[in-house]
Amino acid sequence: MVNAKRSASIQRLVVCALMFGALTLAAGCSSMGSSPASSAPSKAVLITAGNGTTYVMIPTSDGKGVQTLSTTGKPETCEKCKADAIKAFNGESIAPVCDKCGATRTLLQMPAQ
Ligand SMILES: [Zn+2]
């Protein structure tokens, strides 16, 4: 039961991340006017830290940084994980385990819409 509950909470977090990204993009589009639709965030990195904390990193609207979303509200973000997430968003592979903080990283590909 505990595992099922935790899994559901992670799924909810990912959905929230996607909605947040879509909202950010929509806001960016309406203010910029000419943003191509192809800049929609299509990837996210799911981070599971050693203490069980789970959070999701998504690209910022300019694609140069990451936004971190967490169920705890106070994610202990690791600089190495952040840097690797940015690389992953730009098409590079990401090591499944961070060699700095030991967190497990999973690259999530959004289904094409
Ligand atoms: Zn790390």
Image (cartoon, grey):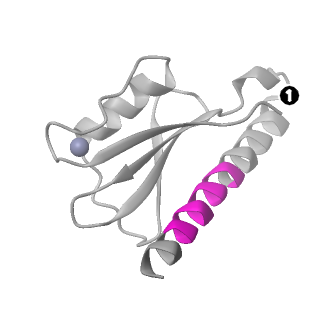
Residue at (40, 23) in percent of width and height: 87
Q: Is residue 91 above or below residue 7?
A: above
Q: Position of residue 54 (x, y in %)?
A: 39, 61
- Crowding at dot 1, Cα within 10 Å, few <14 / some 14-19 / many 20+, comes out as few
- Taking depth in this image into account, of 109 and 64 the one nearest to the observer is 109
Residue at image location 66% in from the left, 46% down from the top: 21
Q: Which residues are magenta?
A: 7-19
In the shown orientation, is residue 107 left or right of residue 36?
left
Residue 98, position as x, y percentages in the image? 22, 39
The C terminus sits in image quarter: top right
> Circle 1 sits on which residue?
33
Callout 1 amino acid: Gly
Q: Is residue 54 above or below residue 6?
A: above
62 or 2, nearer to the observer: 2
The residue under the point 54% across, 70% down is: 9
Residue 11 seen from this side: yes
User: Does residue 101 show up magenta in the picture?
Assistant: no
| Count of numbered labels shown in the rendering | 1
Q: Quadrant of ligand 1?
A: top left
Q: Secondary structure at mark 1?
A: loop
